[in-house]
Amino acid sequence: MAQPSQRSGGYAKGRAKRQEIIEAATVVFGELGYTKTSMIEIAERCSLSRAGLAHHFPTKESVLSAVLAWRDTVDTQRFRSEGVPEPDGLAILRAVVELAAENAKVPGLVGMYSCLAAEAASPSHPAHDYFVRRYDMVEQGIRDALEDVRRSGGLRPEVEPARAAISIVALMDGLQVYWLLRGRQVDMAAHLRSATSSMLTVEL
């Protein structure tokens, strides 16, 4: 019978391998998109057989789900690291800009997200519902932040929070694609800060 320490070691190795697969799949999805990516391609990137990959993830859709969950975890951790202690609108807008700066450090995640988001516009794509929910959540969060800033007198009178939130979300994603196409030479955070600041009467 395996000792507890042996079982723990096995679990740790299994978790490490799953994470390796998730990170490799993130890169492949970013390069090829979900549709053109095969399980064999993912397996080869991890030095696994197709059967070995299936031990951890039985289907390509299960790999996709794990990749998207990891993306959410990474974003949440980075957003919290910016230190938004309470739901203060201006602090949230600052954290969104800082998140754009942090994204420049993870081109693999940015590439994967941009590619999958475009593919997922099709209702038949397995990530379609995920991206619809994600965009709804992000848009609502930014709208709430802008509403909070308006209540404190920090929003220009002509700025309507619902429309402005859509503009900020669209700019964030558009900048990521432009950044990728321009060889990562675009300062995403600076452009996002400038556009957001133009909506405010206070310093961002």
Image (cartoon, grey):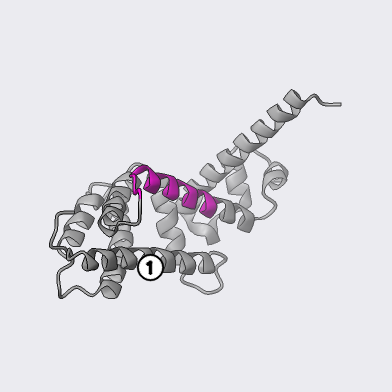
| Bounds of the magenta segment | 67-85
| Residue furthest right in the image | 1
Direction left: furthest residue: 201
User: Residue 190, how many percent across, how many down?
Assistant: 19, 51
Q: Is residue 117 left or right of residue 43?
A: left
Q: Residues within 10 Å of mark 1 (few under 14, many from 20)?
A: some
The one of 169 and 126 positioned closer to us in this rendering: 169
Q: Amino acid at mark 1?
A: Gln
Residue 156 part of the magenta segment:
no
The residue under the point 18% across, 67% down is 155
Task: State the predominant SS element of the stretch in magenta.
Answer: helix
Image-based side of 22 in relation to 150, left or right? right
Residue 49 locus on image (x, y percent): 68, 41
In front here: 95 or 116? 95
Residue of label 1: 140
Question: Horizontal and vertical percent for residue 141?
Answer: 37, 63
Task: Specify the quadrant that holds the C terminus.
Answer: bottom left
The reply, left or right, for residue 182 in relation to residue 83 is: left
Quarter location, residue 202: bottom left
Q: Residue at x 70, y 47 (%)?
A: 54
68 is within the stretch colored magenta: yes
Residue drawn 59% across the image and 38% down it: 46
**Total labels drawn:** 1
Q: Is residue 196 above or below residue 7?
A: below
The quarter of the rendered structure image containing the N terminus is top right
Residue 112, horizontal then vertical, whole percent: 44, 53
Q: Could you tell me which residue is drawn at 30 percent across and 74 percent down?
A: 162
- The reply to whether residue 120 is visible in this rendering is no
Q: Is residue 155 visible?
A: yes
The local secondary structure at tag 1 comes to helix
